Image (spheres, grey):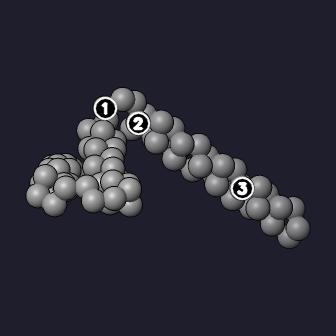
């Protein structure tokens, strides 16, 4: 699945350059759309391949959120046990 995601992002990245090469950049709005079209797949590729430490930060963030939820559940269970 990772391979497919990387291939599709590369295709989107290349497609952005092909479209700009074919049609050019007529105005500021088109330039902004082009930059987004190029930046999103590039960022996705970096995250998917773990380049630049993005994967580590994402993993730590998700782990922290899981621990927070676990503590909330434990607090709720502790409260329910004391009430019974």
Pointer 1: what residue?
51
Quadrant including the N terminus: bottom left
Which residue appears farthest toward the bottom when viewing the image? 84
Which picture quadrant has residue 5?
bottom left
Whether residue 72 sits left or right of residue 80 in the image: it is: left
Q: Quick check: marks 2 and 1 in contact, CB under 8 Å?
A: yes
Q: Earlier in the sequence, mark 1 or mark 3?
A: 1
Q: Residues within 10 Å of mark 1 (few under 14, many from 20)?
A: few
Asked if 55 appears above or below 52 in the picture, the reply is: below
Position in image of residue 80 (x %, y %): 81, 66
Position in image of residue 43 (x %, y %): 33, 44
SS at badge 2 = helix
SS at badge 1 = helix
Q: CA distance from mark 1 to mark 3?
A: 33 Å
Q: Quick check: marks 1 and 3 in contact, CB under 8 Å?
A: no
**Mark number displayed over residue 72:** 3
Q: Residue drawn 39% across and 30% down?
A: 53
Q: CA distance from mark 2 to mark 3?
A: 27 Å
- Quick one: 33 or 75, which is closer to the camera? 33
Which residue appears farthest toward the top when viewing the image? 52
Disc nearest the viewer among 2 and 3:
2
Q: Residue drawn 74% across and 61% down?
A: 77
Pointer 2: what residue?
54
Q: Residues within 10 Å of mark 2 (few under 14, many from 20)?
A: some
Q: Earlier in the sequence, mark 2 or mark 3?
A: 2
């Amino acid at each position: 699945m990772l391979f497919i995601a990387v291939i599709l992002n590369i295709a989107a990245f290349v497609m952005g350059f092909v479209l700009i090469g074919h049609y050019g950049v007529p105005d500021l709005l088109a330039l902004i759309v082009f930059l987004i079209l190029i930046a999103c797949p590039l960022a996705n590729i970096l995250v998917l391949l773990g380049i630049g430490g993005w994967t580590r930060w994402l993993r730590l963030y998700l782990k922290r959120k899981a621990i927070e939820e676990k503590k909330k559940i434990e607090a709720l269970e502790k409260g329910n046990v004391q009430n019974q």
